[in-house]
Image (cartoon, helix red, strand yellow):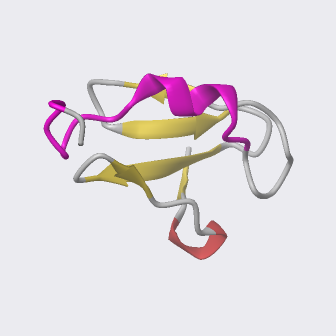
Amino acid sequence: MSNVPAEIFDTKLLEILVCPMTRTPLVYDEAAQELISEAAGVAYAIKQGVPVMLIEEARKL
């Protein structure tokens, strides 16, 4: 097990995660705890360190 608390997002995931709508890279917004898809114009929430990558849960920018 890692010593990193569960509520902290592991930025190494950005190397493999892509937007489920556009298949483009995501940008991590640490202050808002969101992954931003500039191509789709949406943000995916990060809850307790886990990104919620459901299209229907994305917030429009």
x then y, percent, for residue 44: 50, 51
Measuring 41% from the left and 40% from the top, which residue is drawn there?
Answer: 34
Quadrant where the image shows the C terminus = top right
Front residue (pair 43, 2): 2
Magenta region:
3-18
Q: Is residue 28 left or right of residue 8?
A: right
- Quadrant of the rendered image containing residue 13: top right
Measuring 65% from the left and 32% from the top, which residue is drawn there?
Answer: 26
x then y, percent, for residue 28: 48, 26
Measuring 69% from the left and 35% from the top, which residue is drawn there?
Answer: 16
Tally the marks. Answer: 0
- Quadrant of the rendered image containing residue 33: top left
Question: Which residue in the rendered view is the most extreme toward the bottom?
Answer: 56
Front residue (pair 36, 23): 23
- Quadrant of the rendered image containing residue 20: bottom right
Q: Where 13 falls versus 60 (above or below)?
A: above
x then y, percent, for residue 9: 33, 35
Q: Main secondary structure of the magenta part?
A: loop
| Residue 54 is covered by the magenta coloring | no
x then y, percent, for residue 14: 59, 29
Q: Is residue 14 left or right of residue 32?
A: right
Q: Where 48 falls versus 7 (above or below)?
A: below
Measuring 24% from the left and 42% from the top, which residue is drawn there?
Answer: 1
